[in-house]
Amino acid sequence: MKFEVLAIDGAARRGRLTTGHGVVDTPVFMPVGTRATVKSLAPDDLVAAGAQMVLGNTYHLLMRPGHEVVRELGGLHRFMGWDGAILTDSGGFQVWSLAKLRRITEDGVTFRSPVDGSSHFLSPELVIEVQQALGADIVHPLDECLAYPATHEETERSSALTLRWARRARDRHRATGAPAQALFGIVQGGTYADLRARAADETVALDLDGYAIGGMAVGESRSAMYELTALVAERLPSARPRYLMGVGKPGDLVESVARGVDMFDCVLPTRNARNGQCFTWDGPVVIKHARWTRDPAPLDPNCACYACRSFSRAYLRHLFVSDELLAYRLLSLHNVRFFLDLMAAMREAIAAHAFEAFRTRFFSRYGVSSVDVSTDERAGGEV
Amino acid sequence: MKFEVLAIDGAARRGRLTTGHGVVDTPVFMPVGTRATVKSLAPDDLVAAGAQMVLGNTYHLLMRPGHEVVRELGGLHRFMGWDGAILTDSGGFQVWSLAKLRRITEDGVTFRSPVDGSSHFLSPELVIEVQQALGADIVHPLDECLAYPATHEETERSSALTLRWARRARDRHRATGAPAQALFGIVQGGTYADLRARAADETVALDLDGYAIGGMAVGESRSAMYELTALVAERLPSARPRYLMGVGKPGDLVESVARGVDMFDCVLPTRNARNGQCFTWDGPVVIKHARWTRDPAPLDPNCACYACRSFSRAYLRHLFVSDELLAYRLLSLHNVRFFLDLMAAMREAIAAHAFEAFRTRFFSRYGVSSVDVSTDERAGGEV
């Protein structure tokens, strides 16, 4: 994997990731394909929306259909029919948030599957092995996630364990990994600036292909998330990509790009689509409202997605209130397109050294940045 | 609307309907778009599958969003973004099977909406008015449907009412209809040969643009359905299209084309897709079976649909057992494509005067005709 920074504007970076499955322009938003599918969308929908990279959740794929099945069927790209780039997370967040009866030791984590109650053990080495079977372009080491809030002591101990696990993951990856598969580190450290700084420095010392900022958007305030993101991003090497895991709302993407983040993933565009919330440049639209019953206008006249080119708000509302499956697909198509268009607009603004003007214009139209609303987007995959 | 018979092979006919929304090759299968959407499919999916005409359910559209809303938004074609031909039924079957507290008089039918309990009245004239608002290419007169079984006396009385309503519908249609909108008659008569023959003759005397065979696939035996279909089809004028409402399974389509039917609609391809049953030339496939867990082969190697070109049975099974929305769309895409391919194969066989050979070959591969299994496909729309 190769990463080039093509332009810098303030802390914002316009870059290019070259993977074994195509070029990815950064800042990039990765639609979430938890179970080897971005919910309700097919690969050709993603291509049409402009997606270059999607995320798969290691934990969910391990539970079903199992990494051996995916390996046997030619890896995750072939299994899900996606020729673009794929990033897999480590499963740490999901074990923390979804699994039952988890027990963490120095060795790794034991937990019960919520699917069938079966017992599983994951170590840093096994997580690398699972991700090698899946065959993503970018993989992650097992990390420990903490509930918010956590004490300084708990966070320090946990962050140190994540570091030790990252070293073991790196060693296994170096010994057995395919050269095309990149390994990122995950910077934890909770809401403590000193621990975040230490975690960043020690993770960077492992000399990994890129760096993820983990443990964000779990309930802390937006201002804390922005500050800690800036703090960590500043300490990460400029020549490597920076990935803010599980973030976020459109405003969060703009604010985090402004702080030097290159990569994002979030369930919001697809999950909100299924709840009838649509993203537009003028702010969110709730499609079920009776005011759209006879509205012949598209969801967003500025959007070139299939839904906006083909259908009225009245029709989309009719589908949604009728619980028609097509509603979920069309609104997902639109929302994913909006997130990808937003990233493209940011890339263009950075390249033109006009990011600050873009940021001001974006918020004046979309609505003010909800900096004081606490974060709650992180979903641990979309099921 | 123009109808031409291009080739005849036995009783089977290869024809061409020319509508205000394109040419429709017959025998044709119309995917069911009950609520202005063929479940889980978008118009471009239908075009890719080869659909030339879809069915809309007058009753469901009247209940939601209402025919006035559809009219205001430019008619059903524009509302649902479908440029091909559309046929609407009359709502009679749905009032019979779905509505609560219906009361039938000479004037028409009064019923309560199962959506909101509101009271509605439909007369033959109002049903024409509603369908004019929807703007389908082919519309139908209000008819009375009977439960199976019904006595000869009940059936005779009901069939006569349907005839009187058809005359009123025709008169209203002639007085107020757009020239491009065709009106079909509906031949009732239950399972009684004499009543079917009389209904056919009296409906034909109304000189309508085409003739539907109604009240089939409601529980009678397959052999009865085939015999009555043949009996009615023979009495219908060869220069007008013949439509067997709500039928059927692949074998029923082949057997009914052999008896001179030109048009079909049925919820099976889409409804069964959502239940995980897929149609193939080698018979049905139940996708959730564990035997497909590691199967890299497509659902049907002979099929050119997006699902078969892009994905393995293993992946489709994974999506289905994971309750992923994409499963319903991909299996619907495939099933609709199979039904449309089957019709295309029949058209080709008729044109080549080789329909009997095709019929034998079809059943030897797909499985024997279940002539003694009673019919139960008629769904009154797909909700």
Image (cartoon, coloured by chain):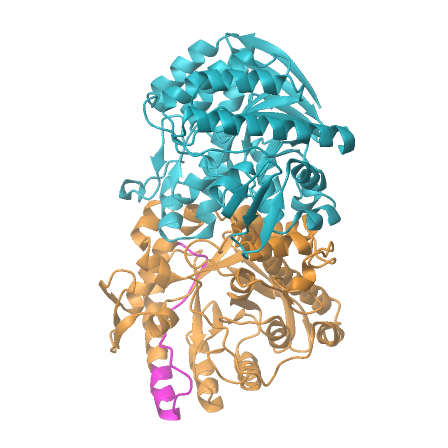
Chain colours: A cyan, B orange
The quadrant of the image that shows the N terminus of chain A is: top right
Closer-to-camera residue (B340/A382): A382
Instruction: Decide which of A312, A137 is in the foreground and name it.
Output: A137
Horizontally, residue B30 falls left or right of residue B79, namely right
Say whether residue B128 is visible.
yes
Percent of width and height locating residue B349: 72, 68
The answer to whether residue A136 is magenta is no
Q: Position of residue B209 (x, y in %)?
A: 47, 67
Q: What is the number of callouts on the image?
A: 0
Q: Residue at x 64, y 16 (%)?
A: A205
Who's the residue at 48% across and 11% down the image? A355
Q: Position of residue A140 (x, y in %)?
A: 62, 31
Give the residues in magenta: B135-160
Q: Quadrant of residue B129?
A: bottom left
Residue A235, above or below B14: above
Q: Is residue B137 located in the magenta-colored stretch of the structure?
A: yes
Q: Could you tell me which residue is drawn at 62 percent across and 81 percent down?
A: B370
- Toward the viewer: B344 or A193? A193
Q: Is residue A122 left or right of residue B74?
A: right
The vertical placement of A280 against B68, above or below, is above
Residue occupying the far left of the picture:
B119
Residue A258 can be seen, yes or no: no
Q: Please identify the quarter of the rendering in which residue A351 is found.
A: top right
Camera-side residue of A281 and A240: A240
Where residue B110 appears, as percent x and y from the top left, is 24, 71
